[in-house]
């Protein structure tokens, strides 16, 4: 495999893996209890996203049977962490006023391995560093609007050959979403409802090879999605820290086969999130640690309405969607 062809394959794979996808806002609630709120300083850690991302990247290369691709090994996987950062002032859509800001961070380092002499590089290995940052803003009072910005940065390089052999890809997406209906304040088994999401997006993708000039493209578009929510069953989710009684909430776009399942704790936040394609699970994240004013301290109080835990599920499901999209985009390209 020549250096040029290998970089071309890699560049295409990177674009497939980082094209921003639609964000599905999830209605969150307690197990038959009124929706709770978050306070500044709350944080939640989820495991599983890095494994899903690594497997997705490996499948892209493995689909090219002539490439001699063998597999991947993990360097490090920093678990997905979501922090409720601060109260601030926001202005987007028809909303202007106070909001709560949250941030999700994740980093991953893996090594992709090819058969001996399948590439012109030492050890036939490629090193990947992938970092994800998502910032979410949600009004503190009742509003149909929310806004999210997402940035995914990928650096990849082969060793040896006295050259840098580096490819860098960055993608940024700013999404402003309007929902046609408010989420229920209380969820119970058997509840179902449907909303229309109007999403305004600005996408920016840039890439460069060996620290050359950046090649950047920017686009903007609107999309509309009808999402059906169904509270399907009560289920206990076992984690290393606790056994959680949950309600399983199914999210599915009208007319689509793919869907997601979110397991909501009695306190309202997602304990587990799963994505399915044609009935087959393709990724899963599970809550491994947390610190919440709802659980182990006084609640955050204010004369304004505090945001619900929708912010957590939106970010968790949105992050997972980036991995699913890499699989779908690559399949469509073949």
Image (spheres, rainbow, N blue to C red):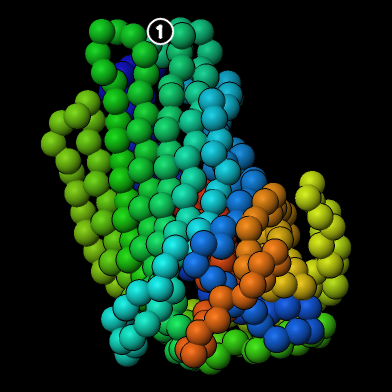
Q: Nearer the viewer, residue 334 or 291?
A: 291
Question: Residue placed farthest to the left in the image?
Answer: 213
* Residue 208: percent from left, percent from top: 22, 36
SS state under label 1:
helix
* Residue 318: percent from left, percent from top: 51, 62
Name the side, left or right, on which 51 lies relative to 192: left
Name the side, left or right, on which 14 lies relative to 211: right
Q: Nearer the viewer, residue 195 or 62?
A: 195
Query: Which quadrant holds residue 221?
Result: bottom left
Query: Which quadrant holds residue 10?
Result: top left
Query: Which quadrant holds residue 310?
Result: bottom right
Does residue 65 sit above or below 256 in this rendering? above
* Residue 237: percent from left, percent from top: 82, 59
Q: Label 1, on which residue?
A: 122
Total numbered labels placed on residues in the image: 1
The answer, for residue 323, to whether it is visible in the render is yes
Q: Nearer the viewer, residue 93 or 61?
A: 93
* Residue 228: percent from left, percent from top: 63, 81
Name the side, left or right, on which 188 lies relative to 183: right
Does residue 62 sit above or below 97 in this rendering? above
For image coordinates 81% across by 62% down, the residue present is 244
How many C-alpha atoms fall within 10 Å of the one at disc 1: few (<14), some, or many (≥20)?
few
Does residue 32 sit above or below 173 in this rendering? below
For image coordinates 13% across by 36% down, the residue present is 213
The answer, for residue 8, to whether it is visible in the render is no
For image coordinates 43% across by 30% down, the residue present is 128
For image coordinates 71% across by 59% down, the residue present is 272
């Amino acid at each position: 495999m020549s250096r040029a062809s290998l970089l071309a394959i890699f560049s295409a794979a990177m674009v497939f893996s980082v094209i921003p996808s639609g964000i599905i806002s999830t209605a969150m609630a307690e197990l038959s209890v009124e929706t709770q709120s978050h306070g500044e300083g709350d944080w939640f850690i989820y495991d599983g996203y890095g494994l899903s991302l690594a497997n997705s990247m490996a499948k892209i290369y493995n689909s090219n049977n002539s490439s001699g691709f063998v597999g991947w090994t993990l360097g490090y996987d920093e678990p997905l962490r979501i922090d409720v950062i601060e109260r601030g002032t926001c202005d987007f859509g028809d909303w202007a006023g106070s909001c709560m800001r949250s941030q999700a961070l994740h980093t991953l380092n893996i090594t992709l391995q090819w058969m001996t002499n399948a590439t012109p590089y030492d050890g036939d290995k490629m090193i990947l560093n992938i970092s994800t940052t998502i910032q979410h803003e949600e009004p503190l009072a009742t509003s149909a609007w929310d806004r999210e910005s997402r940035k995914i940065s990928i650096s990849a390089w082969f060793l040896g050959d006295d050259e840098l052999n580096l490819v860098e890809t960055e993608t940024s997406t700013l999404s402003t979403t309007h929902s046609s209906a408010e989420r229920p304040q209380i969820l119970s088994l058997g509840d179902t409802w449907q909303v229309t999401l109007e999403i305004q997006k600005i996408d920016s993708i840039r890439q460069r090879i060996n620290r050359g000039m950046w090649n950047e493209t920017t686009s903007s578009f609107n999309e509309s999605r009808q999402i059906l929510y169904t509270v399907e069953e009560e289920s206990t989710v076992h984690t290393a820290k606790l056994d959680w009684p949950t309600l399983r909430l199914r999210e599915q776009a009208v007319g689509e086969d793919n869907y997601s399942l979110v397991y909501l704790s009695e306190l309202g936040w997602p304990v587990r999130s799963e994505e399915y394609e044609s009935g087959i699970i393709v990724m899963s994240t599970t809550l491994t640690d947390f610190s919440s004013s709802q659980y182990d301290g006084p609640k955050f109080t204010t004369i304004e309405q505090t945001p619900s835990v929708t912010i957590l599920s939106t970010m968790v499901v949105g992050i997972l969607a980036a991995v699913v999209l890499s699989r779908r985009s690559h399949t469509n390209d073949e």
